[in-house]
Image (cartoon, helix red, strand yellow):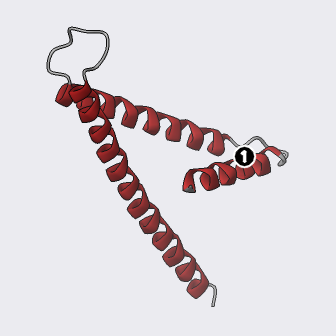
Amino acid sequence: DGDGDNRSARVHVVGAAATTRAPSRTMDRAQQNELEAITDMFNKMTEQCFRKCVAVYKEPDLSVGEATCVDRCVHKYMTVHGKVQEILGQQAQQAQQQAQMQMGAGMR
């Protein structure tokens, strides 16, 4: 699963930042931004799937139909979110490569 790989990379980066003498406020801010983005995505997904799948809130447990709807909604939301993250990651990587190429060309 790719999540484990990302988590390992994140821990490695955090560990590397912790070994430097100066505290890394940029890393802390990046982590805070990531946490806020994940929380926002989760809240939007919860609201949208609840609104779509639960017509009347009258019982403490979801009906079979509501649970099925929520499962499908969450799966679809997470799939789309993953695809968007993948595309954004590719674009960021391409931008970084272009910037490195431009810096290399400028040093000649």
State the quadrant of the N terminus.
Answer: bottom right
Q: Residue furthest bottom?
A: 108
Q: Which residue is mark 1?
A: 14
Q: Is residue 45 above or below residue 107?
A: above
Q: Quadrant of residue 70?
A: top left
Identity, as a three-letter code, of the amino acid under mark 1: Val
Look at 47% across and 34% down and name the residue there.
36
State the quadrant of the C terminus.
Answer: bottom right
- Locate residue 99 relative to residue 74 in the image: left or right: right
Residue 65 screen position, x and y as percent? 21, 29
Residue 48 screen position, x and y as percent? 24, 32
Q: Quadrant of residue 63?
A: top left
Q: Is residue 10 above or below residue 71?
A: below
Of residue 58 and residue 88, the one placed in the foreground of this image is 58
Look at 36% across and 29% down and name the residue there.
43
Residue 80 screen position, x and y as percent? 32, 52
